[in-house]
Amino acid sequence: MAFLRALRAAPSGLVALVAMVALLAIAVLGPILLGRAANELDFRSVAAGPSAAHPLGTDQLGRDLLARLLVATRLSVGMGLLAEVLAYAAGIPLGAMSALIGPRWRPLLMRAIDTMIAFPGLLVTIYLVTILGPRLGLLGLAAGLAVPGAFRAARVVSTLSLSIAGRDYLAAARLVGVRTPRLIVRYLVPNMAETLITSFAVGVSFTIVAFSGLSFLGIGVQAPSFDWGRMLSEGVNSFYETPAAALGPAAFIAAAALAFAYAGEALARAANPRVWTRAPAARTTAPAGSPAAGGGSGSEETLVVRDLTVRLGGLEIVSGVSFGLAPGEMVGLVGESGSGKTMTALGIARLLPATAAISGGVTLLGRDLETMTKPELARFLGTELAVAFQDPMSSFNPALTMGTQLTEGARRHRGLDRRQAAETAVARLLEVNLPAPRRVLREYPHQLSGGMRQRAMIAMGLMNEPRLLICDEPTTALDVTIQAQIMDLLARVNREHGVAVILISHNLALVRQNCTRTLVMYAGRIVEDLPSERLLTAARHPYTRSLLAAVPDLERRRGERLTTIAGQPPDLSARPSGCPFHPRCPLAQDVCRSERPPLEASPDGTRVACWMAGARVPA
Amino acid sequence: MNVLQVRGLTVRYGAGARALTAVDGVDLAIPAGGTLGLVGESGCGKSTVARALVGLAPVAAGQVTLGGADCSAPAARTSPAYRRRVQMVFQDPHSSLNPRMSVGEMLHEALTTRGGRFRSRRERAAESRRLVEVVGLPANTVDRYPHEFSGGQRQRIAIGRALAVGPEVLILDEVTSALDVSVQATVLNLLQDLQRELGLSYLFISHDLSIVRLMSDEVTVMYLGRVVEHAATEEFFTRPAHPYAAALMQSIPTLRGERRPAPLSGDLPDPRQPPPGCRFHTRCPVGPVARPERTVCVERDPRLEPAWREHLAACHFAEVGAR
């Protein structure tokens, strides 16, 4: 029933679907129920206008036009469907083959398809219909309509197939011995279903119109058969006397075309299994407030985060996060994916999507972000805070030169002119060890290597001499030797410029070696906060300790087993009661299952949220 | 005794000036029932080696022997018989499973194509359930679709599919690099268990030396399409002979050691135009950049030779010590 829910989300699609189903029903039932009425001659009212007995009037022989229109639906819609089915039956294998046959023959096949598309489709149809029509009747007509459609379908399928052919699952299937026909049927077609359904439906709508056009011109359906196009052409002759005779078929043609086109889109959306197999998201009732802990008084700190909570799509993804950051401090934020590290950072930087709801306080350099107006905030964050993301390729605009992107912020926020900004950019690029900075400024992002882009990203962050730099997995996409270079750079920026750094990483060893303090996050909350140098000796939360034990340090020998954490990170839509870690925790007691432990500060400044903090983990 | 042996493997993409020789004359051998760790950074050609070994990359030259039989012809590596013996698990479990097929359907498919060992539908269904249990997933896994699983579970499914054809050799291409550390641990443990129970041989490809040490009996290091070092695991980690391998080791952050400054400067050169002589000389901390008198590094391509006993290295100054 989730299928229906998916449809309800788009009412226009629902209307189109209903219209399509109605058309199909008319196509099936029309000739059965109204076949006689449509051919009944009523000589008392010949070529008459609309009346109670004949809502659309009658034709030259006194036959009821509405009945005829409804009966004609079978031929018009049926031909549209038949022609498209033929087109796709030929087009899908043709297009799929062009992706599967390998690089030598591919260009030849693709060019052949392109050449066929270049012919005007309707002309090809008219030509074929003139040759085939008389001999094969309706099947000849359908074939004539199908040929241009087949090449269009082949083109769509081949483009989609090529993108799927690069996926590992296709390679994996070949490795286990799956043959080509099955690859097409089970791998290519289902994975392009959405697009195929849409283009099929649009094709049907196109073909209905084309077929009507042929009949209108007199080379389609021949009397005594009749379809919408033929009725239109007959109606047009007496347009000034009985306009309904022409407008009726015209309206049906237009409505059918629209119904198929829109219904196709609605069906395509619903064809994705993700839409109908995902469990409905349960609402959570998270506690509204939580005690703000630690963080210090705040006046001398670069950043103070108090009770930061982020809600997105009905889920609380960050819950009551509080911490402070001294000038020149480098803090690591660690946790598994989905623990809320990135969302915390984006919440601080006010970079969350507009649909997110943030609560709690963020004070940067003594100024409360809540109290600022939008333009003030943009300017303040634009100069005092910088963020470097994991994938610098997707954070740079590929269409602009590095120079434009690096200088934009400085020109906007600090009012530098083009030359001054360029000079600053050169200086910053030199600082991050990018050789030939002037050339880099003229280049586009794709011309730089991954390591160079990340350094350029950090240089861009440093343009306005910010006091806080947030780095979200800055080295995850990079090689270890390059990672070491970037960490050197961050350490220097941190030390020499006194810039406070938040380093978000899943790599505990990296954080342990580079950060003064480590914050461990789990299910949207900070569960432990302690100096990095004491991570190995003084971690008290069982989650932190399990994470540490799972790290394959260089010390591990061949065959050694790694400690694992049972289960999986909690689903935020179904958060466990009490301590969110309890279902995976080796120490869990009754209290852990019922009550959530607060994040409590010790006299030594460390914080931990665990009822069993420091207890020995059973072997 | 090696189960899969490769000599002079060369893979080239394109032709002419834009040609990329991704793998250039690589020798390697996977010990029977053991693991060869293949290490290197992105662009070194390690994944291309993997793909070449299962017939997914164009091999320009080289010999491949599987259990003594010659499989050098490209057609030999796409034959059903070869694929029944050599399977591969890909890096990203999100792209290696067909989102439109249930796990059961995937396994059935792999079982159907396996030389007829499971003839009836019932046998295949039973074998699918056994396979998902072997990789540590609940039996109802077979009725579910890939998107219902986490990354670690998906990787288990991918391993199960590879096992379905009953292979001897598994090529594991960065199989845990897309996973969280706790999940990585479970997958690595599973692979170790499977190796012990089924006597599988692994080619374990990774950029992460710490997991390579955990998983491998022998280690081969690649740089820019070439093998630069090969040794037994403990020997390799105790005294790396090639300066590149030593730099790799130094770059890895560890939980216990202190941070060390980055040992290498500069980026990987363009693999389309590899530097002359030793390909590593542009970044080498003991090469001509640091010691201008070592011109031999620019002039002569070092061969992979014993630095001491069975420890091979391709470096003109391997014996004098990398550091």
Image: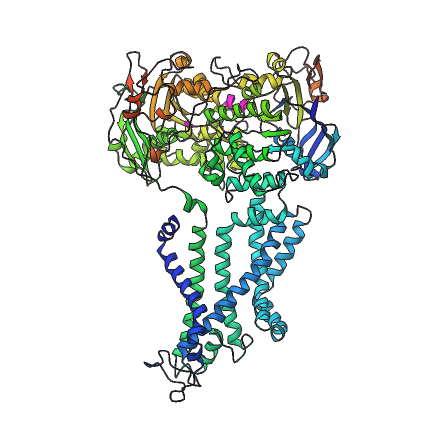
Q: Does residue A474 appear in the picture of this structure?
A: yes
Relative vertical location of residue A246 with respect to residue A261 in this rendering, above or below: below
In the current view of this chain or complex, which residue is farthest to the bottom?
A44
On the image, the x and y values in percent for residue A369 come to: 28, 31
Q: Nearer the viewer, residue A511 or A470?
A: A511
Query: Which residue: 54% across, 62% down?
Result: A84
On the image, the x and y values in percent for residue A556 come to: 53, 15
On the image, the x and y values in percent for residue A43 come to: 41, 89
Query: Is B75 left, or right, of A343 in this rendering?
Result: right
Q: Quadrant of the C terminus of chain A?
A: top left
* Quarter of the image where one finds residue A49: bottom left
How is the model colour-coded? rainbow
Q: Is A475 inside the magenta-drawn segment?
A: yes
Query: Which residue: 38% across, 61% down?
Result: A18
On the image, the x and y values in percent for residue A67 come to: 41, 76
Query: Is A457 left, or right, of A542 in this rendering?
Result: right
Number of residue marks: 0
Magenta region, residue range: A471-485
Q: Is B264 inside the magenta-drawn segment?
A: no
Relative vertical location of residue B109 with respect to residue A19 in this rendering, above or below: above
Q: Nearer the viewer, residue A239 or A97?
A: A97
Q: Nearer the viewer, residue A24 or A510?
A: A24
Query: Which residue: 48% across, 67% down?
Result: A77
* Quarter of the image where one finds residue B66: top right
Q: Does residue A167 appear in the picture of this structure?
A: no
Q: Nearer the viewer, residue B60 or A47?
A: A47
Relative vertical location of residue A433 with respect to residue B294 in this rendering, above or below: below
Query: Is B130 left, or right, of A362 in this rendering?
Result: right
Relative vertical location of residue B172 with respect to residue B114 in this rendering, above or below: above
